[in-house]
Amino acid sequence: MPFLDELTNTAEQIDALLDRLMPLDTAPAKRVIDAMRYASIGQGKRLRPFLVCESAKLFDVEDTHALRTGAALECIHCYSLVHDDLPAMDNDELRRGKPTTHIAFDEAAAILAGDGLLTFAFEILAHPDTHPDPVVRSKLVSELAIASGPAGMVGGQMLDLEAEARESHDLDEIITLQGMKTGALFRFACESGALLAQAGDAERSALSVYADRVGLAFQIADDILDQESTPEQLGKQTQKDAEAGKATFIDLLGLDGAKKRAHALVDEACASLDAFGNRAGILREAALFIVERKN
Amino acid sequence: MPFLDELTNTAEQIDALLDRLMPLDTAPAKRVIDAMRYASIGQGKRLRPFLVCESAKLFDVEDTHALRTGAALECIHCYSLVHDDLPAMDNDELRRGKPTTHIAFDEAAAILAGDGLLTFAFEILAHPDTHPDPVVRSKLVSELAIASGPAGMVGGQMLDLEAEARESHDLDEIITLQGMKTGALFRFACESGALLAQAGDAERSALSVYADRVGLAFQIADDILDQESTPEQLGKQTQKDAEAGKATFIDLLGLDGAKKRAHALVDEACASLDAFGNRAGILREAALFIVERKN
C-alpha cells in the first residue's frame, strides 16, 4: 500500500476505535464526553499512532494491541492540544481548521475534556485488550506517564511558556525543551512497538534513536511550515510563536539552515533502522513525510 | 494509637513520600514541579490515603504498597482541586487556608501542575514498588482511571457545573452527581486494600458498600460545614455553592434532615464491615469522624 494510503488507513482505524471506546449514548455526563470526542475524533494525521502501528509491525505485534496503544497516545496528544489552546496558555481559537474546544464548548468543559482524555489514555492501556501480559500493560502505562509528565511533555510546555519571557535563546535550550514537549511522545510512539513485543534492548534503542531524530525534525518542520504557510493551509493561526517571542529553529538556524538540519536528521533517523532492513521501509518514508508535509 | 494520631501519622507519611517522589532539585522544569508540590504537599487531612491504608491493614498488605497507592490517589484528588479552583471553573482563591495554585503561581502553571499530578498518579501506580505483581498494578491503574475519568470524578464535576444552570434539583440527581464527583474516589480508596491483597469479591463488595455510604456522608457533612462554619474554620470561602445556585443536601433535606441522614449513613457504613470484626475498628471510627469533623 502506498505510504499516504497507509497513513490514512491507520487514521481511520484510530477514529473508529476512539468512536467505539467513547460512546456518547450511555454516558451519564454527556457534555464532557461530547467535548472529548470533539477534541479527538475525525481530525489530524494521527502521526503518533501511525508510528506506534508501524514500529509494532516490525515485530509482528497484533493490530489490536498496536491500535489501542496508538489510541491511548493520541488521547494524550489531543488533551495536550486542548489545554495548550486555553486562553491562559497559548490562547488559540483555531485548531485543525475548526474552533478549539474551549471556543466550541466553554473553558470549563475544555479543561475537563482534557482531564478526561488524559485519564482515559491510561484506562485504555491498562485494559487486558491492549495486551494479555500485565507486565507489558504496566510498562506501557509507566512509559507513557513518564513521557507525558513533568519530565516529558508537561515539563516541556512549562519550559516553553517560560522561554517566552526571556529575550535570548540558544539552540541547546530549544532542543531540550522540544525534546520534552514533542520528542517524548514520539519516543513513546516508536518504542511502543518494541515494548508490545517485549523486544530486546538493541531494537528498542534503535527505535529510540529514530524517534529522537524524527521528533526534532518534526518540530523544525513545524517552524518552517509556520513561516511559509497560510492559516488556511495549516488550519490554525500562523507565526504566533515568533510574535509571542518564542524562539524558533528558524531564528537560530536561519530558514536554509533549518531545512538542511531537518533533512540531516531524516538521514540519521533512516540510518538508525539499518538492522531492520526492508521491514522498516515505511518508517523511513514516514521520516521523509514528516519534513516534507504541507500541514 | 488513638484515631486522630493514626490519621496524622498517615498524613505525615504521605507527605514524606510525595516529597521524596517529587524532588525539585533534579527537575528540568522546576516551576511545574514547584506548583505540583505546592498543590499536594503539607496540607489536608489525607482522608483518602488514610482509607487506602486502613482498608489495606484489614488484609495485612505491606505499608509501602498501601502508602504508594494512597499517594497516587491523593495526586488525583489534589489535581482535581487545582483544576476545580480555576477561574473558568469554581473560581476559588483560597484552599486549605492558603492561596489556590493559580493565585500563588499563575493559571498556566496551575493547569500544567494539575495535568502533571494527574499523570504522576499513574506513574506511581504502575511502578513495581507499588506492588510486585503486575496484575495488581494494572488493575489499580484501571480502577483509578475509571474512578477519576468521565464516568467518575471528571463526569461528576461536569454534571455539577451543569446543575448550577438549572433552577430545580432533586435528591436522586444530587446523589448521582456526588457519587461520581466525590464517591468514586472514596470507592477506589476503600476497595484498593482488597485490590492490593487480591482479596475475594465478598470482601471487596463489603468495602464498596462502606465507601458508598461514607462518601455520601462526607458530602452531606461538607454541605453542613459550609453552612455552619466560618471561612477561617474551613480555610476556604463558605456558602459559595448556595450562592452559585448549586443544590446542596441542606436545600433538599433541611439541616436536621441532613444531619440525620449523615448519621444513618455512618450506621450503614459500620454495619457493612461486620465480617471484618474488630479489625475494622478504625474504619468505623473514620466513618464517624467524617460526619463530625469541624473542617
Image (cartoon, coloured by chain):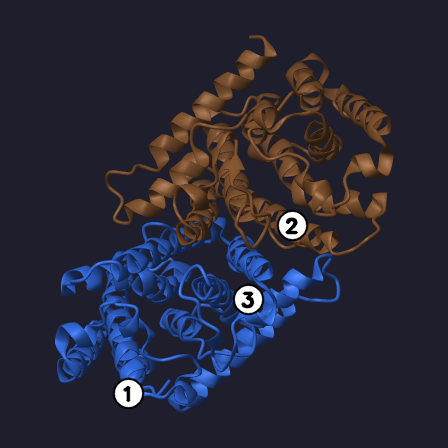
Chain colours: A brown, B blue
Q: How far apart are marks 1 and 2 (CA)?
A: 42 Å
- Residue B232: quarter of image: bottom left
Give the residue at mark 2. Answer: A157
Q: Position of residue B270 (x, y in %)?
A: 22, 77
Identify the residue at the far top of this view. A1
**Which amino acid type corresponds to the residue marked 3 in the rendered image?**
His
- The residue drawn where x is 76% and y is 31% is A213
Instruction: Give the x, y percent position of residue A166.
Output: 78, 55
Identify the chain of the residue marked 2, using the numbered disc in the image: A
Q: Position of residue B239 (x, y in %)?
A: 31, 78
Q: How many residues crowd mark 2 within 10 Å: few (<14), some (14–19), many (20+)?
A: many
Task: Point out residue B178 in the picture as x, y percentages from the top left corner.
Answer: 27, 64
**Residue at the image point whose x is 48% and y is 28% from the top:** A43
Q: In which quarter of the image is the C terminus of chain B?
A: bottom left
Q: Which amino acid does label 1 sit on?
A: Glu
Binning the other alpha carbons within 10 Å of mark 3 as few (below 14), some (14 to 19) or many (20 upward) gives many
A215 lies above or below B255: above
* Secondary element type, mark 2: helix
Whether the residues at callouts 3 and 2 have beta carbons within 8 Å, the answer is: no
**Residue at the disc numbered 1:** B228
Q: Nearer the viewer, residue B55 or A147?
A: A147
Dividing the picture into quadrants, the one containing residue B110 is bottom right
